[in-house]
Amino acid sequence: RRTALHAAAGLPAAALIGAPGLARAAEFEWKYGHNLPVTHPLHLRAQEAVDRIARETNGRVEIKIFPNNQLGGDTDMLSQVRSGGITFFTPSALVIATLVPVAAINALGFVFTDYNHVWKAMDGGVGAAVRQAISRVNLHAFEKMWDNGFRQMTTSGRAITDASAMDGLKIRVPVSPLSISMFRGLGAAPASLQFSEVYSALQTRIVDAQENPLPIIQVAKLYEVQKSCALSNHIWDGYWFIANGRAWRGLPADLQRIVSNAINEAGLQQRGDIAGLNATVQADLQSKGLAFNPTEPDSFRAKLRAAGFYNEWKGRFGDEAWSLLEASVGKLA
Ligand code: X2X
Protein backbone atom coordinates (compact mmCIF):
# COMPACT_ATOMS: atom_id res chain seq x y z
CA ARG A 1 0.00 0.00 0.00
CA ARG A 2 2.82 2.41 0.78
CA THR A 3 4.24 1.68 -2.65
CA ALA A 4 0.93 2.45 -4.29
CA LEU A 5 0.58 5.73 -2.45
CA HIS A 6 4.09 6.83 -3.32
CA ALA A 7 3.88 5.77 -6.92
CA ALA A 8 0.53 7.41 -7.38
CA ALA A 9 1.01 10.54 -5.31
CA GLY A 10 -1.26 13.26 -6.58
CA LEU A 11 -3.75 10.95 -8.27
CA PRO A 12 -7.30 10.87 -6.91
CA ALA A 13 -7.94 7.68 -4.95
CA ALA A 14 -10.48 6.42 -7.48
CA ALA A 15 -7.84 6.43 -10.17
CA LEU A 16 -5.95 3.74 -8.26
CA ILE A 17 -8.68 1.16 -8.31
CA GLY A 18 -7.84 -1.49 -10.80
CA ALA A 19 -5.03 0.56 -12.25
CA PRO A 20 -2.66 -1.93 -13.90
CA GLY A 21 0.88 -2.24 -12.61
CA LEU A 22 0.16 -0.65 -9.24
CA ALA A 23 0.41 -2.53 -5.96
CA ARG A 24 -3.00 -2.80 -4.34
CA ALA A 25 -3.94 -2.29 -0.71
CA ALA A 26 -3.28 -5.40 1.33
CA GLU A 27 -6.27 -7.74 1.47
CA PHE A 28 -5.70 -8.23 5.17
CA GLU A 29 -4.60 -5.09 6.94
CA TRP A 30 -4.31 -5.91 10.58
CA LYS A 31 -3.23 -4.39 13.88
CA TYR A 32 -1.19 -6.09 16.60
CA GLY A 33 -0.96 -4.48 20.04
CA HIS A 34 1.36 -5.37 22.93
CA ASN A 35 2.47 -3.96 26.26
CA LEU A 36 6.27 -3.86 26.01
CA PRO A 37 8.90 -1.28 25.07
CA VAL A 38 10.33 -1.64 21.55
CA THR A 39 13.69 -2.75 22.96
CA HIS A 40 12.24 -6.02 24.31
CA PRO A 41 12.94 -9.20 22.26
CA LEU A 42 9.21 -9.81 21.95
CA HIS A 43 8.83 -6.62 19.93
CA LEU A 44 12.00 -7.12 17.90
CA ARG A 45 11.12 -10.67 16.87
CA ALA A 46 7.48 -9.77 16.20
CA GLN A 47 8.68 -7.00 13.87
CA GLU A 48 10.78 -9.56 11.97
CA ALA A 49 7.77 -11.87 11.77
CA VAL A 50 5.43 -9.22 10.33
CA ASP A 51 8.07 -8.16 7.79
CA ARG A 52 8.47 -11.79 6.76
CA ILE A 53 4.69 -12.23 6.50
CA ALA A 54 4.36 -9.18 4.22
CA ARG A 55 7.17 -10.53 2.03
CA GLU A 56 5.98 -14.13 1.84
CA THR A 57 2.35 -13.17 1.17
CA ASN A 58 3.43 -10.64 -1.49
CA GLY A 59 1.83 -7.88 0.52
CA ARG A 60 -1.55 -9.61 0.92
CA VAL A 61 -1.18 -9.63 4.73
CA GLU A 62 0.10 -6.46 6.35
CA ILE A 63 0.34 -6.28 10.12
CA LYS A 64 1.10 -3.02 11.89
CA ILE A 65 2.49 -3.25 15.41
CA PHE A 66 1.36 -0.90 18.17
CA PRO A 67 3.89 -1.45 20.98
CA ASN A 68 4.15 -0.19 24.52
CA ASN A 69 0.44 0.06 25.38
CA GLN A 70 -0.20 2.62 22.64
CA LEU A 71 -3.70 1.18 22.20
CA GLY A 72 -4.43 0.96 25.92
CA GLY A 73 -3.41 -1.39 28.73
CA ASP A 74 -3.70 -5.17 28.83
CA THR A 75 -7.36 -5.21 29.78
CA ASP A 76 -8.22 -2.85 26.92
CA MET A 77 -6.20 -4.83 24.37
CA LEU A 78 -7.80 -8.09 25.52
CA SER A 79 -11.25 -6.72 24.84
CA GLN A 80 -10.13 -5.21 21.52
CA VAL A 81 -8.77 -8.53 20.26
CA ARG A 82 -12.05 -10.18 21.21
CA SER A 83 -14.16 -7.61 19.39
CA GLY A 84 -11.83 -7.47 16.37
CA GLY A 85 -10.72 -3.87 16.98
CA ILE A 86 -7.22 -5.34 16.84
CA THR A 87 -6.42 -8.69 15.28
CA PHE A 88 -3.41 -9.76 17.34
CA PHE A 89 -2.37 -9.37 20.97
CA THR A 90 0.24 -11.02 23.18
CA PRO A 91 -1.20 -11.26 26.69
CA SER A 92 0.83 -12.86 29.43
CA ALA A 93 -0.66 -16.13 30.66
CA LEU A 94 -1.57 -14.23 33.83
CA VAL A 95 -3.59 -11.68 31.89
CA ILE A 96 -5.47 -13.96 29.48
CA ALA A 97 -6.41 -16.01 32.54
CA THR A 98 -8.95 -13.31 33.44
CA LEU A 99 -10.87 -14.71 30.46
CA VAL A 100 -9.56 -18.31 30.31
CA PRO A 101 -8.84 -19.31 33.93
CA VAL A 102 -6.81 -22.46 33.15
CA ALA A 103 -4.29 -20.32 31.24
CA ALA A 104 -2.74 -19.30 34.57
CA ILE A 105 -1.64 -22.87 35.29
CA ASN A 106 1.98 -22.24 34.27
CA ALA A 107 2.08 -19.38 36.76
CA LEU A 108 1.34 -21.47 39.83
CA GLY A 109 3.96 -20.57 42.44
CA PHE A 110 7.29 -22.40 42.33
CA VAL A 111 6.27 -25.26 39.99
CA PHE A 112 8.97 -24.90 37.35
CA THR A 113 12.58 -25.28 38.35
CA ASP A 114 14.07 -24.78 34.89
CA TYR A 115 13.34 -24.15 31.23
CA ASN A 116 13.40 -27.85 30.32
CA HIS A 117 10.29 -28.30 32.41
CA VAL A 118 8.75 -25.11 31.09
CA TRP A 119 8.96 -25.97 27.40
CA LYS A 120 8.14 -29.63 27.97
CA ALA A 121 4.86 -28.51 29.55
CA MET A 122 4.03 -25.58 27.29
CA ASP A 123 4.98 -27.25 23.98
CA GLY A 124 3.27 -30.42 25.24
CA GLY A 125 0.07 -31.37 27.01
CA VAL A 126 -0.32 -28.33 29.24
CA GLY A 127 0.06 -25.88 26.36
CA ALA A 128 -2.33 -27.88 24.19
CA ALA A 129 -5.01 -27.85 26.90
CA VAL A 130 -4.63 -24.11 27.36
CA ARG A 131 -4.80 -23.44 23.61
CA GLN A 132 -7.98 -25.46 23.39
CA ALA A 133 -9.51 -23.45 26.23
CA ILE A 134 -8.47 -20.24 24.46
CA SER A 135 -10.18 -21.42 21.26
CA ARG A 136 -13.43 -21.85 23.20
CA VAL A 137 -13.59 -18.07 23.75
CA ASN A 138 -13.24 -17.58 20.01
CA LEU A 139 -9.56 -16.64 20.00
CA HIS A 140 -6.81 -18.46 18.11
CA ALA A 141 -3.58 -19.12 20.03
CA PHE A 142 -0.47 -19.89 17.97
CA GLU A 143 1.36 -23.07 18.97
CA LYS A 144 4.58 -21.65 20.37
CA MET A 145 4.37 -19.58 23.50
CA TRP A 146 6.81 -16.65 23.76
CA ASP A 147 8.98 -16.20 26.84
CA ASN A 148 8.42 -13.54 29.47
CA GLY A 149 10.63 -15.25 32.05
CA PHE A 150 10.93 -16.24 35.66
CA ARG A 151 9.43 -13.48 37.76
CA GLN A 152 11.57 -11.83 40.47
CA MET A 153 10.53 -9.38 43.17
CA THR A 154 11.87 -5.85 43.47
CA THR A 155 11.27 -3.30 46.20
CA SER A 156 12.14 0.23 47.20
CA GLY A 157 12.06 -0.86 50.85
CA ARG A 158 14.09 -3.44 52.73
CA ALA A 159 15.38 -6.45 50.85
CA ILE A 160 13.09 -9.49 50.57
CA THR A 161 15.21 -12.41 51.73
CA ASP A 162 12.56 -14.83 52.91
CA ALA A 163 8.80 -15.16 53.13
CA SER A 164 8.51 -13.23 56.40
CA ALA A 165 9.51 -10.05 54.52
CA MET A 166 6.26 -10.33 52.56
CA ASP A 167 4.02 -9.42 55.49
CA GLY A 168 2.05 -6.30 54.61
CA LEU A 169 4.24 -5.55 51.58
CA LYS A 170 2.45 -3.26 49.12
CA ILE A 171 3.27 -5.00 45.88
CA ARG A 172 1.95 -4.41 42.38
CA VAL A 173 0.86 -7.52 40.50
CA PRO A 174 -0.68 -7.86 37.01
CA VAL A 175 -4.46 -7.91 36.60
CA SER A 176 -4.59 -11.59 37.53
CA PRO A 177 -6.64 -13.49 40.12
CA LEU A 178 -3.83 -16.02 40.60
CA SER A 179 -1.27 -13.32 41.39
CA ILE A 180 -3.60 -11.70 43.93
CA SER A 181 -4.29 -15.06 45.56
CA MET A 182 -0.61 -15.99 45.68
CA PHE A 183 0.59 -12.74 47.21
CA ARG A 184 -2.25 -12.68 49.72
CA GLY A 185 -1.24 -16.22 50.62
CA LEU A 186 2.27 -14.93 51.22
CA GLY A 187 0.88 -12.29 53.60
CA ALA A 188 1.45 -9.30 51.28
CA ALA A 189 -1.00 -6.56 50.28
CA PRO A 190 -1.07 -6.97 46.48
CA ALA A 191 -2.66 -4.44 44.12
CA SER A 192 -3.57 -5.26 40.50
CA LEU A 193 -2.38 -2.66 38.01
CA GLN A 194 -1.94 -2.88 34.27
CA PHE A 195 1.68 -2.83 33.16
CA SER A 196 1.20 0.61 31.60
CA GLU A 197 0.82 2.03 35.13
CA VAL A 198 3.68 0.27 36.89
CA TYR A 199 6.55 2.72 36.49
CA SER A 200 4.59 5.69 37.80
CA ALA A 201 2.97 3.67 40.58
CA LEU A 202 6.46 2.78 41.84
CA GLN A 203 7.77 6.28 41.32
CA THR A 204 4.96 7.90 43.28
CA ARG A 205 5.10 5.15 45.94
CA ILE A 206 1.52 4.03 45.44
CA VAL A 207 3.16 0.64 45.80
CA ASP A 208 6.60 -0.24 47.19
CA ALA A 209 7.29 -3.41 45.24
CA GLN A 210 6.59 -5.21 41.98
CA GLU A 211 7.53 -8.52 40.40
CA ASN A 212 8.67 -9.17 36.84
CA PRO A 213 11.35 -11.06 34.92
CA LEU A 214 14.73 -9.26 34.76
CA PRO A 215 14.55 -8.42 31.01
CA ILE A 216 11.36 -6.42 31.70
CA ILE A 217 12.93 -4.68 34.69
CA GLN A 218 15.70 -3.73 32.29
CA VAL A 219 13.75 -2.51 29.23
CA ALA A 220 11.05 -0.74 31.25
CA LYS A 221 13.76 0.87 33.42
CA LEU A 222 12.11 -0.22 36.66
CA TYR A 223 15.58 -0.19 38.29
CA GLU A 224 15.28 3.61 38.29
CA VAL A 225 12.49 3.43 40.84
CA GLN A 226 13.43 0.29 42.82
CA LYS A 227 16.36 -0.45 45.15
CA SER A 228 16.72 -4.18 45.45
CA CYS A 229 15.78 -7.37 43.70
CA ALA A 230 15.08 -10.70 45.35
CA LEU A 231 15.86 -13.66 43.10
CA SER A 232 12.70 -15.57 43.91
CA ASN A 233 11.85 -17.26 40.55
CA HIS A 234 8.36 -17.52 42.00
CA ILE A 235 6.42 -17.73 38.72
CA TRP A 236 7.36 -18.70 35.19
CA ASP A 237 5.42 -16.48 32.83
CA GLY A 238 5.03 -16.51 29.05
CA TYR A 239 3.07 -14.70 26.38
CA TRP A 240 0.37 -16.32 24.25
CA PHE A 241 0.38 -14.92 20.73
CA ILE A 242 -3.34 -14.74 19.97
CA ALA A 243 -5.55 -13.71 17.06
CA ASN A 244 -9.20 -12.74 16.82
CA GLY A 245 -11.02 -15.97 15.94
CA ARG A 246 -13.22 -14.60 13.20
CA ALA A 247 -10.36 -12.82 11.44
CA TRP A 248 -8.20 -15.93 11.68
CA ARG A 249 -10.84 -18.23 10.23
CA GLY A 250 -11.35 -15.76 7.39
CA LEU A 251 -7.75 -16.11 6.27
CA PRO A 252 -7.21 -18.64 3.43
CA ALA A 253 -5.31 -21.77 4.50
CA ASP A 254 -2.16 -20.99 2.48
CA LEU A 255 -1.86 -17.58 4.14
CA GLN A 256 -2.64 -19.08 7.56
CA ARG A 257 0.34 -21.38 7.06
CA ILE A 258 2.68 -18.49 6.24
CA VAL A 259 1.50 -16.45 9.23
CA SER A 260 1.69 -19.40 11.64
CA ASN A 261 5.18 -20.38 10.53
CA ALA A 262 6.50 -16.85 10.79
CA ILE A 263 5.01 -16.26 14.23
CA ASN A 264 5.95 -19.65 15.69
CA GLU A 265 9.52 -19.46 14.38
CA ALA A 266 9.91 -15.91 15.66
CA GLY A 267 8.64 -17.16 19.03
CA LEU A 268 11.34 -19.83 19.17
CA GLN A 269 13.98 -17.23 18.35
CA GLN A 270 12.56 -14.92 21.00
CA ARG A 271 12.96 -17.71 23.57
CA GLY A 272 16.62 -17.87 22.57
CA ASP A 273 16.97 -14.09 22.98
CA ILE A 274 15.61 -14.26 26.54
CA ALA A 275 17.96 -17.15 27.32
CA GLY A 276 20.83 -14.99 26.07
CA LEU A 277 19.68 -11.99 28.08
CA ASN A 278 19.33 -14.12 31.21
CA ALA A 279 23.09 -14.62 31.11
CA THR A 280 23.90 -10.89 31.21
CA VAL A 281 20.95 -8.98 32.55
CA GLN A 282 21.74 -9.25 36.26
CA ALA A 283 25.21 -7.74 35.83
CA ASP A 284 23.74 -4.92 33.77
CA LEU A 285 21.06 -4.13 36.35
CA GLN A 286 23.66 -4.28 39.12
CA SER A 287 25.79 -1.73 37.27
CA LYS A 288 22.70 0.50 37.14
CA GLY A 289 22.41 0.39 40.93
CA LEU A 290 19.94 -2.44 41.61
CA ALA A 291 21.09 -4.65 44.50
CA PHE A 292 20.45 -8.40 44.29
CA ASN A 293 19.89 -10.98 46.97
CA PRO A 294 19.01 -14.68 46.97
CA THR A 295 15.87 -15.95 48.73
CA GLU A 296 14.84 -19.10 50.55
CA PRO A 297 12.29 -20.65 48.20
CA ASP A 298 11.22 -23.20 50.83
CA SER A 299 10.00 -20.49 53.18
CA PHE A 300 7.72 -19.13 50.42
CA ARG A 301 6.42 -22.56 49.43
CA ALA A 302 5.69 -23.48 53.03
CA LYS A 303 3.75 -20.26 53.58
CA LEU A 304 1.69 -20.85 50.45
CA ARG A 305 0.96 -24.43 51.43
CA ALA A 306 -0.12 -23.34 54.90
CA ALA A 307 -2.41 -20.71 53.36
CA GLY A 308 -4.13 -23.44 51.32
CA PHE A 309 -2.96 -21.87 48.06
CA TYR A 310 -2.11 -25.09 46.20
CA ASN A 311 -5.27 -26.89 47.26
CA GLU A 312 -7.43 -23.96 46.24
CA TRP A 313 -5.85 -23.73 42.78
CA LYS A 314 -5.88 -27.46 42.23
CA GLY A 315 -9.63 -27.18 42.65
CA ARG A 316 -9.89 -24.17 40.37
CA PHE A 317 -7.77 -25.63 37.55
CA GLY A 318 -9.39 -29.05 37.82
CA ASP A 319 -7.88 -32.54 38.02
CA GLU A 320 -7.31 -32.90 34.30
CA ALA A 321 -5.14 -29.80 33.89
CA TRP A 322 -3.41 -30.58 37.18
CA SER A 323 -2.35 -34.06 36.05
CA LEU A 324 -1.08 -32.69 32.75
CA LEU A 325 1.10 -30.30 34.71
CA GLU A 326 2.31 -33.10 36.98
CA ALA A 327 3.18 -35.15 33.89
CA SER A 328 5.70 -32.44 32.98
CA VAL A 329 7.07 -31.32 36.34
CA GLY A 330 6.45 -34.27 38.67
CA LYS A 331 4.13 -34.61 41.65
CA LEU A 332 2.95 -31.26 43.06
CA ALA A 333 2.00 -30.20 46.58
O1 X2X B 1 2.41 -6.74 33.54
C1 X2X B 1 3.45 -7.38 33.72
O2 X2X B 1 4.00 -7.45 34.81
C2 X2X B 1 4.05 -8.14 32.56
C3 X2X B 1 4.72 -7.19 31.62
O3 X2X B 1 4.97 -9.08 33.03
C4 X2X B 1 2.94 -8.86 31.93
O4 X2X B 1 2.61 -8.66 30.80
C5 X2X B 1 2.22 -9.81 32.80
Image: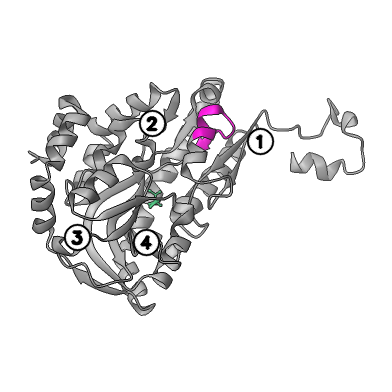
User: Along the line of sight, which residue is nearer the eye, 16 or 56?
Assistant: 16
Q: Earlier in the sequence, mark 2 or mark 4?
A: 2
- Which corner quadrant of the image does residue 211 belong to? bottom left
Q: Is mark 2 within 8 Å of ligand 1?
A: no
Tell me the SS state at disc 3. loop
Regarding mark 1 in the picture, which secondary structure is present there? loop
**Residue situated in front as seen by the camera: 265 or 157:** 157
Q: Position of residue 137 (x, y in %)?
A: 41, 23
Q: Earlier in the sequence, mark 3 or mark 2?
A: 2
Asked which secondary structure carries label 4, the reply is loop
**Residue 21 spot, x, y in % from top left:** 82, 32
Q: Amino acid at mark 1?
A: Gly
Drawn side of residue 328 relative to residue 142, left or right: left
Mark 2 sits on what residue?
99
**Disc assigned to residue 167:** 3
| Span of residues in magenta | 79-89
User: Could you tell which of marks 1 and 2 lies nearer the N-terminus?
Assistant: 1
Q: CA distance from mark 1 to mark 2?
A: 33 Å
Q: Nearer the viewer, residue 5 or 286?
A: 286
Ligand 1 under 8 Å from disc 3 Cβ? no
Mark 1 touches mark 3? (CB < 8 Å):
no
